[in-house]
Amino acid sequence: MGSVRAEFIKLRRSLSWAVVVLLPLAAVGSGGGNTALSGEPLADGWHTLWLRVVVFYGLFPLAVGVAALASLVWRAEHEGGNRNALMARPVSGLEVAVGKFAALAALTAAMQGVLVAGTVVAGKAVYGLPGSLPAEYLLVSVLIVVACLPVAALQSGLSMLMRSFGAPVAVGLLGAGFGVLLVALRADALAAAVPYSLLSRATQVGTGVFADPGPITAEGAADAAGLAAAALVLTAVAVAGTAAVLERRDVA
């Protein structure tokens, strides 16, 4: 699709890459660095390091980071007559929405890759942990990427509607707070319909924090599959909604 290709071309010189690199590295530095400075050992090796890096990152920073990326992806369209030029192209609102979403999905996947790489480097270089990051956490990382998709799709729609860079980010912060509340209250039915809750829950898989039972079992794998399915459904709804709004508000 031409819109997807155009959005990826725009990413080459985008400020989005600063968020992709700096946010996860800040999480690694905060989660692992404080422990290193205190001189405390990692009680359970890789598991302890993953827990300290990923759990807080998934409560607020990750959702806010995705929101910031969405604002950056739509930023150019809110300058001058770029929005009108975008919609003057012979493409549908759906193609535009999918193009923006595809760019965001790639950025969020790259952000998770940086987090995993940073965690591995910290584990080896700072703590001298044996082996490498267990494969289960690589699978959890894939789940986190999937759980980022509905948040990315929703924030893309908000950034399309709001000219302000900060307003959608503020909504992302509030959404993250609400999502954490639902997870803490174990309101599973409602949380399954809230993208931010799914994202917070995905970052806790295998950690034993909040509603998570701990080590991944067959039952836990089934729950993770259900989480991924809910995320994909919400993603489709959010992208379709953004496309529908674009078709009705094709100029700005």
Image (spheres, helix red, strand yellow):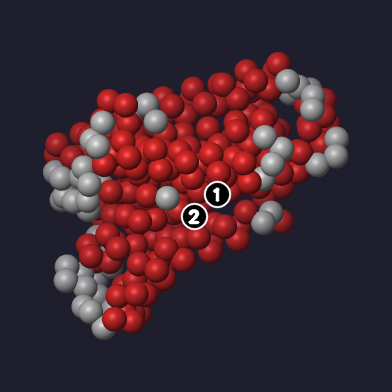
Question: Alpha-carbon neighbours of circle 1 within 10 Å: few (<14), some, or many (≥20)?
Answer: many
Left or right placement of residue 108 versus residue 46 in this view:
right
Which disc is residue 41 wearing?
none
Residue to which mark 2 is pinned: 111
Q: Is residue 177 above or below residue 195?
A: below
Mark 2: amino acid: Met
Q: Secondary structure at mark 2?
A: helix
Alpha-carbon span between mark 1 and mark 2: 6 Å
Q: What is the quadrant of residue 183 in the picture?
A: top left
Dot 1 and dot 2 residues touching (CB under 8 Å): yes
Left or right placement of residue 193 versus residue 92 in this view:
left
Q: Is residue 111 above or below residue 161?
A: below
Mark 1: amino acid: Leu
In percent of width and height, residue 252 lies at: 79, 27
In percent of width and height, residue 19 lies at: 57, 57
Q: Secondary structure at mark 1?
A: helix
Question: Alpha-carbon neighbours of circle 2 within 10 Å: few (<14), some, or many (≥20)?
Answer: many
- Can residue 15 be seen here? yes
Q: What is the quadrant of residue 113 in the picture?
A: bottom left
Position of the N terminus, as image quadrant, is top right
- Which of 3 and 252 lies nearest the eye of the viewer? 252
What residue appears at the point 58 percent right and 48 percent down from the top-left corner? Answer: 68
Residue to which mark 1 is pinned: 107
What residue appears at the point 18 percent right and 51 percent down from the top-left corner? Answer: 208
What residue appears at the point 78 percent right and 33 percent down from the top-left corner? Answer: 83
- Can residue 130 be seen here? no
In percent of width and height, residue 71 lies at: 64, 44
In percent of width and height, residue 162 lies at: 67, 35
Left or right placement of residue 80 versus residue 56 in this view:
right
